[in-house]
Image: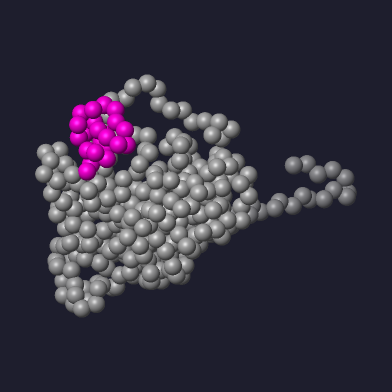
Amino acid sequence: MELHGPDATIPTMTPPRSPAPSRSPAPPSPPAPPDAERIWPVDGPLDLVRTLGPLATGVGDPTIQLGARRVRRASRTPDGPATTEIVLETAPGGGPGAGPGSVPGSGPAPGSIVARARAWGPGAGWAVAHVPALLGLADDPPAFRPDHPLLDELVRRFAGLRFGRTDAVVEALIPAVLGQKVTGTEARSAYRALVRTYGEEAPGPFGLRLQPDPARLARLPYHAFHPLGVERRRAETIRRIGILAARLETATRLDPLAALALLQAVPGVGPWTAAEAVRAALGDPDAVSIGDFHLPNLVCWALAHEPRGTDARMLELLEPWRGQRGRVVRLLEVSGIRAPAYGPRSAPRSIVDL
């Protein structure tokens, strides 16, 4: 470079800067340890998906994650909110006190199946203690002997399908009310929107959500449900359930018939809604949902080869198995049997039409 004149200055060259040392991202925080943990032995086969599947309101239910050997579920227990994770495992060994949280005084036999339960939140202790009831571990599906060729085969094929109970009446009623007189697509969409809008984050590390607190549902005006796709009739029923929540939860201490009567005393809760709730909350193997759009056709086709049915005909065909009619219906639901389809499927509608 040429320099001109007496006052010319010599330019300085700035040395290149060294690259700043790279910073490794901070390691993720370890998940919070559970507030309660326990291992429960599983006697006999257990099909986790088919047993707990009815508790999930479609794919994407924000309150539950369900797989073949693991379930995570958020719920409001009598002691407060809790998230429960249950994992089916093969016991590595036996003996007293085998494994953390094992049942005191006894251990699972080597190679047997156990349910490892962990829970987070104020209701964690109640939740892990309630796992046997939730999974139907006291239920004995193979003991049901229907003496019917099709049903005998379904009992054998789905031996792990059990009837458990959540002991959460309001949580069973809300999705049932949202399913009244609408398509399944509409019901599932409304439920997800309700939980995401008015529910709250559940305890634990899994990102689940709790159903809205009943007291909050009771305070909502009916028009707050409209953006969720819920018209005034169902909205008012949900608000009543929120107001009467404490009384409705006492149904868990009643026999199924008395529980059905208690629930149906609420305006807007009919036989179908009550049966859906009692099946989930009380684990009633005799609960039959009267007024279902598809169920009579399924039962009449499977048991009598009649392509269309009515509630009366369905109950007539189920009568030989009174006391286990709900179990028969559930076996037919998971069987893959379908009544012949006639005409177009029902299309989702605007709430203006409801």
Q: Residue at x 21, y 73 (%)?
A: 98
Q: Is residue 36 left or right of residue 352?
A: left
Q: With 291 as the anchor, is 158 left or right in this view?
A: left
Pick out the residue farthest to the right.
6
Would residue 11 be found to the left or right of residue 86 on screen? right
Q: Is residue 138 above or below residue 173?
A: below
Residue 14: horizontal and vertical position, in percent?
A: 70, 53
Q: Nearer the viewer, residue 18 or 5?
A: 18
State the image coordinates of residue 312 (x, y, percent, origin top left): 30, 36
Q: Position of residue 80 (x, y in %)?
A: 47, 67
Instruction: Tally the marks.
Output: 0
Location of the C terminus (image quadrant): top right
Compared to residue 140, the image places residue 345 above or below, namely above
Question: Residue extending furthest top?
Answer: 343
Residue under the image location 49 percent in, 31 percent down: 348
Residue 27 is at least partly visible in this image:
no
Q: Main secondary structure of the magenta part?
A: helix
Q: For residue 42: magenta? A: no
Give the quarter of the image for residue 338.
top left
- Give the residue at x 64% y 52%: 16
Write the start and end of the magenta stretch as one range: 297-319
The picture places residue 285, in percent across and down from the top left corner, at: 26, 52
Above/below status of 182 relative to 168: above
Residue 19 or 94: which is nearer the viewer?
94
Q: Which quarter of the figure is the N terminus placed in?
A: top right
Q: Residue at x 36, y 48 (%)?
A: 275
